[in-house]
Amino acid sequence: MDHLHAKQQHPKLGLASLAMIALASVSTLDSASAASRQRHSGDAAEESLSRDAVMAVVSIKDQHVTIYDADGGRMRARVSSGRTGYETPVGVYSVLQKEEEHYSNLYDDASMPFMQRITWSGVALHGGALPGYPASHGCVRLPESFARRLFPMTKIGMRVVISYDDVAPVEISHPLLLKPTPPPAIDAAVPIAMSYHEDYGDEDRSPFEPNVKRWPARLAQLEALKSVAAGKQIEADAANSQADEMKQIVAEKKEPRDKTAKALRKLEAAKKSADDKVARADKGLAGAKSPKAVANWEATKAKAVKAAEDLAAKLAALSATLATQESELQLAMQQAAPVEEARVAAVARAKEAKRKTQPVSIFISLKTQKLYVRQGHEPVFESPVTISEPERPIGTHVYTAVDFTKDGKDLRWTAVTLEHRGSNYASSDDRLASDAEGRPQTEAGKAAAALDRITIPADVIERVSEAAWPGSSLIISDEPMSKETSKATDFVVLISTEPQGGIKKRPKQFFRYDNFYRDSSDDFYYGYDRNGRRPYYPRQKPLFWW
């Protein structure tokens, strides 16, 4: 009760008593306000990761995110996902880009601190306001303190699963899950304790390179493969250089040939015009009736014949020049052809050697009956795959190789299953679900049953097993890959039975991905130019958070 109400109820109370009641009331209100802020601020649970994060699971219904590492450690925090009409789509993603200080180019230059992008159309994890219910335009807002703490623990390529219900990964073993190639010295493959904040390698290493510092034998294997890849890249660079030189020679031969061919076409047109004049003179001469007319047409014909003969001589000389230039060009092209073939082969060998140092990502779609392979966020190949009972749904399952096991001889896999739902989706009017700590774990039997229905060709298994590193993944789904799967992405799989307003409401964007990881490319959606600089315009005050 406030102090005015207290005075009405207790007219005999003194000023001191009223002051004490007022203070108590204010204290009570402050406590309630603090409790409310704590409920809606998204403060993270007192849990932590001992190693790099390998997966983030966002629960739309519970408005929570849980981060998992390879050892089962976890961090948890409240989130705010997309509001009605802009729902954060349920599906499978990965981190594509990280930026500590980021601003939306679409929504009034709104601040997006510690942004971790999961689609190129603009869906991301980032720090932001948490009102206690879904309120964003498709992104997943995190408490800023949590986003700051999480940022150094994640890597490009970390799996992000957005599910309606909360679900925890479960360890799984199955013959279909990839087995790594034997390490060079299995007796040396002893795990070494380390934490996510320990430096591993130099700053120039690929963001997709697996962190195997805990396993000396596997680290030695990786370094050996990197050395081979570096050697193959040197060969590819040399082949590129030689091919460029040959291209330059061909260009130097082609340019004069093209100029001569163009001049020859003009000369042929002039010769035809001269021949036409000779023909007209012949016709005029045949019809001449007087000696004067005959003399005039004879003079005209002589002049036309002389011009035609001069042009014919020039045409013959230019034709000979063109023939010589064409011969030289064809010889240069013949010499360049094997050099170009060698370049293509060298580049392919370099790419293949590099791929052996990167975890492999596999997607199997029931809808297309195909298996797709990506590495380093780029497509590698695809292949038909056999799925038993293709008329029966198989669900959406994400299998992740989190670490080596059995002294480095095998990989330890986890599975997460997304249940397909089509109703009871969280909306702006929904409030947070219970804070119960229990998170339903994926049913290992259901995840294994999906694997039981898959038959992968032996040659495909052999090829992808060469890149079976921690961080490798397999996704099985009823769905096809989303159109969000493009350049510089891992597979994006969206559940068609769930709202997708957070992606569908976004205007179509055009991006340049060339040389992206080295110096940033055109990023018109987030307001960056091809040099990684933000275009100059006055900073607007954000009207709302994304």
Image (cartoon, grey):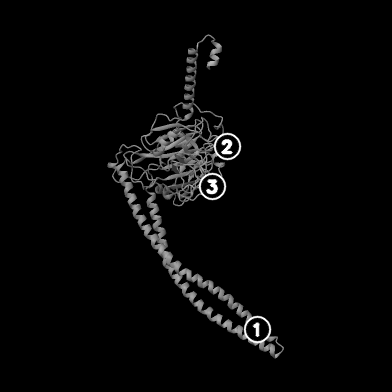
In this rendering, is residue 436 above or below 94?
Answer: above
**Which of the two labelled residues, at mark 2 and mark 3, occupies the earlier sequence position?**
2
In percent of width and height, residue 132 lies at 51, 29
**Which of the two labelled residues, at mark 2 and mark 1, occupies the earlier sequence position?**
2
Instruction: Name the amino acid, label 2.
Output: Gly
Secondary structure under the numbered disc 2 in the rendered image: loop
Secondary structure under the numbered disc 3 in the rendered image: loop
In percent of width and height, residue 128 lies at 48, 35
The residue wearing badge 2 is 85
The residue wearing badge 1 is 281
Q: CA distance from mark 2 to mark 3?
A: 19 Å
The answer to whether mark 2 and mark 3 are in CB contact below 8 A is: no
Instruction: Name the amino acid, label 1.
Output: Ala
In percent of width and height, residue 266 lies at 56, 74
Q: Is residue 199 left or right of residue 130?
A: left
Q: CA distance from mark 3 to mark 1?
A: 66 Å
The residue wearing badge 3 is 509
Name which quarter of the figure residue 240 lies in.
bottom left
In percent of width and height, residue 15 lies at 50, 13
Q: Nearer the viewer, residue 376 or 129?
A: 129
**Which of the two labelled residues, at mark 3 and mark 1, occupies the earlier sequence position?**
1
Residue located 61% across and 84% down the image: 303
Circle 3 residues within 10 Å: few <14, some 14–19, many ≥20: few
